[in-house]
Image (cartoon, grey):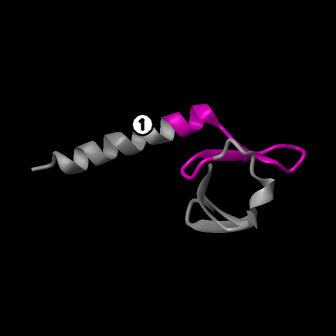
Amino acid sequence: MVTLDRIEGEVAVLLKGEKSLTIPAKLLSPYCKEGDVVEQQADGLWVPNAEQTHKQRQKTRHLLSQLYHKK
C-alpha cells in the first residue's frame, strides 16, 4: 500500500511502509489528496484508490478511538 504523505512544491512524497519515495507532483492525478492511498497506472499517473483510502481511514479512526478511550 502506498500513501500520499505530502506535496512540497513540485515534489510529492509517497510512503510505503517505512520507506519514502519522492516523485514529481505532476505525476499525481488532480484528485489526489494528502493521506490518500494511491496506485500507479500503466501510464505512470498516480491516482487515488477510494476504497483502500476509506478502509485505511476507518482503521486509523478505530485505533485512535481505542487509544483515547483507554483507561
Name the residue at 75% across, 45% down: 29
Left or right: 6, with 26 as reference point: left
| Residue at image mark 1 | 58
Circle 1 crowding by C-alpha within 10 Å: few under 14, some 14–19, many from 20: few
| Above or below: residue 9 compared with residue 26 | below
Q: Quadrant of residue 4?
A: bottom right
Give the percent coordinates (x, y) of residue 10.
73, 67
**Residue type at tag 1:** Gln
Give the percent coordinates (x, y) of residue 54.
51, 34
Q: Quadrant of residue 5?
A: bottom right
Q: Please tell me whether mark 1 sits on a helix, a strand or a loop.
A: helix
Left or right: 71, with 4 as reference point: left
Name the residue at 54% across, 50% down: 35
Q: Is residue 38 magenta?
A: yes
Give the percent coordinates (x, y) of residue 36.
58, 46
Q: Relative to the observer, which residue lies in front, 35 or 64?
A: 35
Name the residue at 82% across, 48% down: 45
- For this orientation, the residue located farthest to the front is 9
Left or right: 32, with 70 as reference point: right
- For this orientation, the residue located farthest to the top is 51
| Above or below: residue 27 compared with residue 29 | below
Q: Quadrant of residue 59?
A: top left
- For this orientation, the residue located farthest to the right is 43
Q: Which residues are magenta?
A: 33-54
Give the percent coordinates (x, y) of residue 30.
72, 45
